[in-house]
Structure formats: C-alpha cells, structure tokens
Image (cartoon, rainbow, N blue to C red):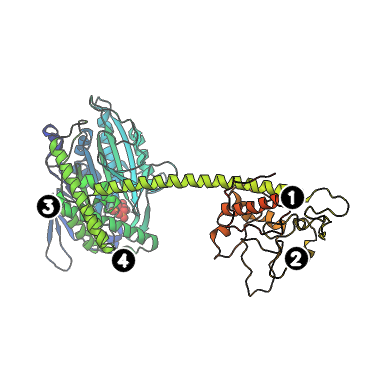
C-alpha cells in the first residue's frame, strides 16, 4: 500500500522561505475497525464499505440513499497495524519533529471504535501476557523508528517525554511522582498554552520510553461499559520532545522553560458516547458528560477555524482544557494528522455519521507549520500578525466583559465607562488598586502592632498594680485587728479571714473588699453596705458598681452574683483580653457586658478596659484614704497608658 496521508505541502521546505510556512491542511485518515465478536453475535449488519483507497461508502439500513466521504486515506477492517502506521505517514511527522517542527497525531471517534487500539494496540490479555509485536500501535512503532533514526543521525539528540491525561476537565500528570494532582494550564506568548509543573522525563533508549508509556497507560482512567470493556475515560497526550543542539541554540537553563526543538504529540481522545447507549450511570455518566462537552468545544473550534473570516478573529480555545492543549495543532503552527475511527455496525451509524462529518470538517482546517526560530529575530509580518491577533483577543475579551456587565443590574452607568477602556487601562487600574491596598495593609499592620505593644505594657502595669495591692492586703497583722489608716480607730473587721479594713482595699470592678477574695467562706460574705451607714440616695463606693458594669435589669429581683477572685484568674477571657497570647494570672476578666453596651465597655476592646482598670487601681493606690470621695468616671480623667502612672 502506498504511503499517503502525509502533508501535501512539505512544511520543511518552507524553512528556506521563512519561519512560517504555507497553509497546510490537517491530514485525516479514516480507519474502519472489523466487526467485534459481540456485534457479530448479535447479527448486526455492516453499513460501511471502502471504495478505493480514499472513499468510504455508507449504506444506511432500510434503503436510504448511499453517502460517500472522501479522506486522505481510508483503511478497512482488514488493514493491519503496520499498514496503518505506514499509510498515516507518521515517519514523515517524525522527520519533521527532528527538524524542529511541532507535530500531532490524534485519534477520535465514538467509544469502542478502536482509537486506543490504533495508537497503542490492544490491552494485554492478562497479567504478564505480552501483546504480540504485530499488534503494536502507531506509538510503539514510531518510538522504535525514532530511536533507530536518532542512533543513525550521527549528531547528539536529546529526547524527552511527558504524558498527561485530561480527566473530568482536570489535567493530571501520568508520569508525575507522588500523588497525582490537577495541574494548571497556562499561556504565554512564547509557548502558547502549556501545562505547568509537568514532569518531562529524559530517556535514552526504547526500553526506557516503553516503560514510560506503560506507566502512563496503567495510570490512565478507564472503566467498563456496554460498548467497551476497557473504555478510556480521559483524553491522553504523550509528547516527545526532540532537541538537536545547533550553533545558534542554547540549551534551556530553566527546567520550566519550553524545550527548544521539535515535538511529536500523540493524542488519544476519549470517545464520544450516547449515555443511553452505553448505560452509563453515576461516575460514568459524569465522565461521559465531561468528555462530550470537551469534544463539543473541539468541534466548535474546528468549525470556526473553517471560516476564513472567523479564523482571523477569536477562536475559543480557552473553552476547555482539551482545546487549549490542541490549539497549536489545530489552528497554529503545527503539522497535524487525525485518525478517525469508526465501527462498521448499523447500530453505531448515527455516531459514525457524526464522526465522519467531524472528520470531513477537520480536513478542511489548515495550519501554518513553523520551523525552529532563530533566537531574537522576528520578521515584521509575524510581529504584525501577532499584534492583530492580540488586538482581536482584546476586542473579544472586552465584548465578553461588556456582556457580563450588562447582565449585572445596577451597573449600567459604569458599563459604558468600562467599554471605553482598553484592557491595558484596566490592568493599570488593578495594579494601582493593588498598590493602594498593599499600602493600606502595611499601615493597618503597623497600627495593630502598636496597639498590641500598648496592650502588653498596660497588662504588665495592671499586673504590677494588683500584685502591690494584693501584697498590701496580706500585710502581717498586729493583734486581732488592723488599724484602718483612714481613721483613728480600728476598722470594723470583715468576717473574712484574715480580717482587713474594708475601706482600704476595694475591688476596682465589683467593689468587693479585697479581703473577701481570699476568704475561704466567701459565700457567707456580708456585703459592704451592711457595714457602712449609707446616706439616702447615696451608695457607698463598695456597693456602687464600677462604671463599666451594665445596670441590673429592672425586672430582675435577683442580685447580681458577686465576683470572686477565682472568677478573675480562671476565666480564659482574661488571657484573650490582655494580650491575646500571654496569660497574666492575676488580672481580672473583662466585664461581660450586654451586646448593646458601648464596645469600649464590652470585651472587644482590650486597651480601653485595661486603661479603665489601670485608672481605678492607680486611683486606689494613690488615694487609699479618699474612698468616700467621688470616683473618676470612665469619661473623666482617662489617661493614656503611660501617663500619670506611679506604682509607688
Ligand atoms: N482494528 C481492530 N482490530 C481488532 N480489534 C479492534 C480493532 N479496533 C478496536 N478493536 C477492539 O475493539 C475494542 C475497543 O477498542 P478501543 O478500546 O481501542 O476503543 P476506543 O475507541 O479507544 O474506546 P474508548 O473511547 O471507549 O476508549 C477493543 O477490544 C479493541 O481491542
């Protein structure tokens, strides 16, 4: 059988004419697989017939008119794997890859139509049962040819490989180390779309490459359904990178950089399927939907590429991961071969017709194969073309943005303003906004740090004051009762142990005698007002609630529970309130105010509460004899933490 299917115009020749060659159509080869055992068992009828080497006749059952489809080559069920490899002209693609071109071979068709068989041969029939070499697919045959060719070239060639699958719209590295995780697809001007963090493995022998292929095949997602026992549930892309150092070429320094040189990519698309026909449910159905959606996106791009006017404008390659990764092969600078696979069975006719139409359209798509670039040189036509392309992309994005804005209510006025701005302007705006936000964040951070430092100092001061206060409470007693420093006579002693002067040390929060805090029988505590005569309308200091304690609710007859020292030292609020991290054991907790209290009086503001406590403590320390006088209200005499504070 003669070799067909290779590109009509030899893109390699265009190297002499310039880096961008003439328009080259995508080559399409059609392969009809033999009837499967199941189809034969069911007595299904064959509706396809090859007429000559390039035409396929379709005879619909029930006597409809015959249809004819013409492709680069048509291969019937009798063709061997070797025939397919030869007719498809893959060696020629390999040669082009060695010269620096970017080449792609992809198979597509209905599920169970023989795509994987064509590319990689049948799956092994059992553990350790090797597949006969005669059944090896296009990929294994190309690998063997390429390794042999490189050996005989007489110049050093670096060969590397990557293998990914697109499963449920996620790109996964089939050669990756560790747990597989989805990889991002990025775009830049030099490389076009590419998979980030992809493992690209260098290999030096056919065995090593075969191992990589087996590794990827075993990791690829596959399941069984009515039409195929081993149906691939993902699109798989194996890429061989071929680099031949020339005097101008500098080997890539950065491993993330695009490899310099040609490449040969094999794409095994997952098969389109009618969920009703395959009986897919649950996960299988999800996979089928994802496969069908991405194939639809591919078909849409192909249709647009056929329209000369649309072709110059925007092609929505970004619509799916598959179209992103095939963008260069379909509409770019690559050389592409498609192998469309079909089943001859009448049962599959609707799907077969759809594949045939898809393939017919695809072979009208052209690319402009581009050879290796000489570094740094960009002809003006290419720069101009790129500029036009970017302008078009820009226009399209603006249009999309505009549409989104029109859908959002209340943005009508802003919409027009948006539409007038270029994307570049928007980018600048975002950058400025970013810078402003960064500055604001820096300022907020520094004020937060200042506040924390201030809070820390305050907490320490409160702690110190309390320590002083406490040690004053525990002064060694003289006789049975201490002499009250505010009066000449002995103070009425608290029943708490040890007896202390009740007017001397008062809790700044609840006004309970400090002696009470250490009283083991504090439940029997006699409130201060019981000891002090009180003028009508006047509440003694000890009975008066501190300024930040919320007034008792009028409806409640129950007196508020007295706070005891253990309340203060055990509550976790205390630790949070003081420093957020550091626990100061003797500091009292924030009063748990009602939600309608001012924030400064609730637990939310550490500094103001600490300041108030400090105030009260300082006041008590400095005026131990003035307890009968009016206490400063929180609004009065508020001082900054460091001001007017003396521990002595
Ligand atoms: N030309 C052929 N000769 C003999 N058997 C074939 C041929 N093509 C396909 N088969 C067999 O048909 C079955 C389906 O083939 P294959 O798995 O390659 O289909 P597919 O198109 O890749 O399906 P899917 O999209 O579900 O992965 C397999 O058992 C395969 O061995």
Earlier in the chain: of badge 4 and badge 1, it is 4
Tell whether label 1 touches label 4 (CB within 8 Å). no
- Horizontal side, residue 298 vs residue 470: left or right: left
Instruction: Name, please, the residue furthest toward the right.
Output: 479
Give me the C-alpha separation between circle 2 and circle 1. 22 Å
Q: Nearer the viewer, residue 126 or 223?
A: 223
Q: Nearer the viewer, residue 121 or 279?
A: 279
Earlier in the chain: of badge 2 and badge 1, it is 1
Of labels 3 and 2, the one closer to you: 2
Residue 470 marker: 1
Earlier in the chain: of badge 1 and badge 3, it is 3
Tell whether label 4 touches label 3 (CB within 8 Å). no
Earlier in the chain: of badge 3 and badge 2, it is 3
Image height of 324 relative to 240, above or below: below
Give me the C-alpha separation between circle 4 and circle 1. 83 Å
Tag 2 residue: 529
Residue 276 marker: 4
Mark 4 lies within 8 Å of ligand 1 (Cβ measured)? no
Give me the C-alpha separation between circle 3 and circle 2. 96 Å
Residue 507 % position (x, y): 70, 57
Residue 103 % position (x, y): 22, 41
Tag 3 residue: 309
Give me the C-alpha separation between circle 1 and circle 3. 89 Å
Residue at the image position 42 percent from the left and 41 percent from the top: 177
Q: Nearer the viewer, residue 645 or 222?
A: 645
Earlier in the chain: of badge 3 and badge 4, it is 4
Give me the C-alpha separation between circle 3 and circle 4. 38 Å
């Amino acid at each position: 059988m003669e070799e067909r299917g290779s590109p009509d115009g030899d893109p390699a020749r265009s190297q002499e004419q310039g880096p961008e060659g003439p328009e080259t159509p995508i080559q399409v080869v059609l392969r009809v697989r033999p009837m499967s055992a199941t189809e034969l068992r069911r007595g299904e009828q064959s509706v396809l017939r090859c007429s000559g080497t390039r035409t396929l006749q379709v005879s619909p059952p029930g006597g409809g008119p015959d249809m004819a489809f013409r492709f680069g080559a048509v291969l019937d069920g009798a063709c061997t794997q070797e025939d397919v490899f030869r007719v498809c002209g893959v060696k020629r693609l390999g040669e082009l890859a060695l010269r620096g071109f970017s080449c792609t071979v992809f198979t597509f068709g209905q599920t169970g139509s023989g795509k994987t068989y064509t590319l990689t041969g049948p799956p092994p029939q059992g553990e350790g049962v090797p597949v006969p070499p005669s059944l090896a697919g296009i990929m294994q045959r190309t690998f063997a040819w390429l390794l042999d060719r490189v050996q005989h070239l007489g110049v050093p060639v670096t060969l590397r490989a990557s293998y990914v699958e697109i499963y449920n719209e996620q790109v996964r590295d089939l050669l990756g180390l560790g747990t597989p995780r989805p990889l991002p697809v990025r775009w830049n001007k030099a490389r076009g779309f590419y998979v980030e963090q992809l493992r690209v493995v260098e290999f030096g022998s056919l065995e090593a490459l075969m191992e990589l292929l087996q590794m990827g095949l075993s990791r690829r997602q596959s399941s069984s359904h009515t039409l195929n026992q081993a149906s691939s549930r993902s699109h798989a892309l194996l890429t061989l990178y071929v680099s031949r150092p020339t005097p101008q070429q500098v080997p890539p320094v950065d491993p993330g950089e695009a490899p310099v040189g040609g490449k040969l990519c094999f794409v095994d698309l997952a098969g389109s399927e009618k969920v009703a026909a395959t009986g897919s449910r649950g996960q299988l159905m999800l996979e089928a939907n994802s496969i069908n959606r991405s194939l639809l996106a591919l078909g849409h791009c192909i249709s647009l590429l056929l329209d000369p006017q649309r072709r110059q404008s925007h092609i929505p390659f970004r619509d799916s991961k598959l179209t992103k990764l095939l963008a260069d092969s379909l509409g770019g600078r690559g050389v592409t071969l498609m192998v469309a696979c079909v089943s001859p069975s009448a049962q599959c006719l609707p799907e077969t017709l759809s594949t045939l139409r898809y393939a017919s359209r695809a072979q009208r798509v052209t690319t402009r194969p581009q050879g290796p670039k000489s570094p740094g040189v960009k002809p003006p036509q290419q720069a101009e073309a790129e500029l036009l392309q970017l302008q078009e992309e820009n226009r399209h994005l603006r249009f999309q943005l505009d549409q989104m804005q029109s859908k959002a209510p209340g943005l009508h006025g802003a919409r027009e303003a948006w539409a007038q701005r270029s994307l570049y302007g928007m980018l600048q705006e975002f950058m400025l906004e970013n810078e402003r936000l960064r500055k604001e964040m820096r300022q907020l951070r520094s004020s937060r740090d200042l506040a924390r430092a201030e809070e820390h100092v305050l907490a320490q001061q409160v702690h110190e004051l309390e320590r002083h206060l406490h040690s004053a409470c525990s002064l060694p007693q003289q006789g049975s009762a201490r002499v009250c420093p505010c009066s000449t006579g002995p103070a009425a002693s608290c029943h708490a142990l040890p007896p202390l002067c009740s007017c001397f040390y008062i809790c700044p929060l609840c006004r309970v005698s400090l002696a009470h805090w250490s009283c083991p029988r504090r439940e029997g505590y006699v409130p201060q007002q019981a000891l002090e005569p009180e003028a009508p309308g006047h509440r003694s200091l000890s009975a008066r609630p501190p300024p930040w304690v919320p007034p008792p609710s009028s409806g409640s007859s129950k007196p508020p529970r007295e706070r005891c020292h253990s309340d203060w030292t055990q509550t976790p609020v205390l630790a949070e309130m003081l420093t957020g991290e550091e626990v100061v054991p003797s500091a009292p907790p924030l009063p748990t105010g009602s939600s309608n209290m001012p924030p400064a009086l609730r637990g939310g503001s550490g500094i103001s509460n600490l300041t108030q406590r400090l105030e009260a403590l300082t006041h008590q320390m400095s005026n131990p004899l003035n307890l009968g006088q009016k206490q400063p209200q929180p609004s009065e005499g508020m001082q900054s933490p460091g001001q007017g504070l003396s521990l002595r």
